[in-house]
Amino acid sequence: MDVLIATLALSVVAPTDFQEIDNSTEALWELVHDLREEVQELKNQDNNDAWFNEQRAIETKNLADQILRDADLRSSLQGSGSTSGWPWLASTDGKFKLKFGGQIQARWLVNEATGQEDDQGFEQRRTKLKFSGHVGNPSWQYKLTHTWARNGGSNMEDAYIAKSFDDGAWLKMGQFKGTFLRESIVSSGKQLGVERTMLDNAFTYGWVQGINYGWSNDDFKMDIQYLDGPNSANGQALGAGTDALLLRAEFKFGGANWKDFAALTSKAGGEQGLLVGIGYQSMDADGGTIEYGNAQIDKSTGWTVDATWRGDGWNVFAYGVETEGEVKATGVTQDSSGWLIQGGFLVNDHTELFAQFQEGTIDGNPTFVNGSADMSALRIGFNYWPIAGSNAVKWTTDVAWAGDSLADSNGTGASSADWTSSGNGWRADTGQNDDQFLLRTQLQLLF
């Protein structure tokens, strides 16, 4: 009986172990040989348990045949010198690896703004295919993320080459996300609400082109990025005319690991921890003014401070941001700032409730034909995961109310309000109307 238990245990562990040692068919053949010897030994036994031994022999023989078929299949796959699994392909020597995945966000929303017709409809907010891995050895990495826009066009988000070093450092060049606002750094698939906030719309660096040096250990991480400027993805070198520098440091406390802080949602059974981040940005444009930080300027500096506190089934996140823009030719400046606080908690293994408040202002009391210099919005909602503990499928619904009149245009001086967009669902108000209402519901699939 002990022999049978040991044999069955080996059969359960074997497939996983074989993947970890490059799916060695030689090991499988040795196991089959041992199992066949066990069958013969059981057949030769002559005792009062003959019937039971015969049943054990049949079961063990069937197990051997199953492993033999698996060995043949693995052998045929290894004919090209490669291994495969979900979701990756790799060479048997470990020098090359390709991981693939994707994201689909199907959304419906309704917007009610005073003085305007109600608007509602469906959209594919995000449709992405992602490819990443390494070439030559695991230290030379790459990532490609191809997207399909809501208007039917296509574009590229990530497109970079990275080199990692043994001391925890890395060097990255190409196209990637600017590491200024933490809300922007966290993936769109791991946000607390349906969409990022109006603050993010005004102050994010988005997808950028440049070079990135970083370093991290168990409790500290830093990023230095030299870029073509905010939202510079898919541009060209000549005529860019914008230089930008991003500096960011993160300090981690408690038992939660870096992976835990990669999401703004709650996690059942998660360790408690605190993440504090500090960011700085500096931008100088020579090819004309650009819109950034609620200003139409060609020079800008700014800072952000954020804190993320999370534990077993709950999370709290807050940050503040401020930028100062300048038109170099005239010396006109425009400051803008904002802050946010949000939190969520699991009511069961499948459902999370959350609330959020954001507020922003364009300093100096600039005037706008439509809207005001201020922004504030309250949001409540829920996340529902059909598969408990998995973020592969998530249904999110939130409702929000903006009390201030929202502007989205140039105002007096260098002001240029940038709170609203088709991406976040908010609309510019007409005149000084306020009390805008937004309902959004979204089904997300990650694979």
Image (spheres, grey):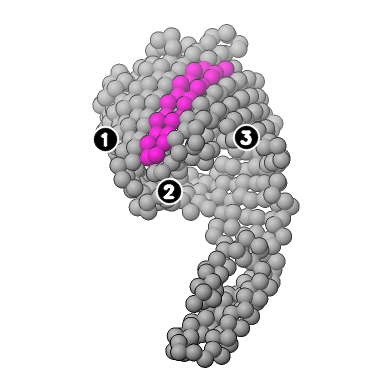
- Residue pointed to by mark 1: 118
Question: Which residue sits at x=59%, y=54%?
Answer: 99
Front position in the image: 18 or 170:
18
Label 2 secondary element: loop
User: What percent of the width, then of the height, locates residue 84?
Assistant: 60, 63
Q: Nearer the viewer, mark 3 or mark 2?
A: 3
Question: Which residue sits at x=61%, y=49%?
Answer: 132
Q: Earlier in the sequence, mark 3 or mark 2?
A: 3
Give the amino acid type for the residue marked by disc 1 in the picture.
Answer: Asp
Q: Is residue 321 magenta?
A: yes
Front position in the image: 73 or 256:
256
Q: Is residue 137 magenta?
A: no
| Residue density around tag 1, few if under 14, some if 14–19, many if 20 or more, within 10 Å | few
- Residue pointed to by mark 3: 217
Question: Which residue sits at x=43%, y=9%?
Answer: 364
Task: Tell me how far mark 3 sits from mark 2, CA to CA.
Answer: 26 Å
The stretch in magenta equals 300-323
Q: Main secondary structure of the magenta part?
A: strand
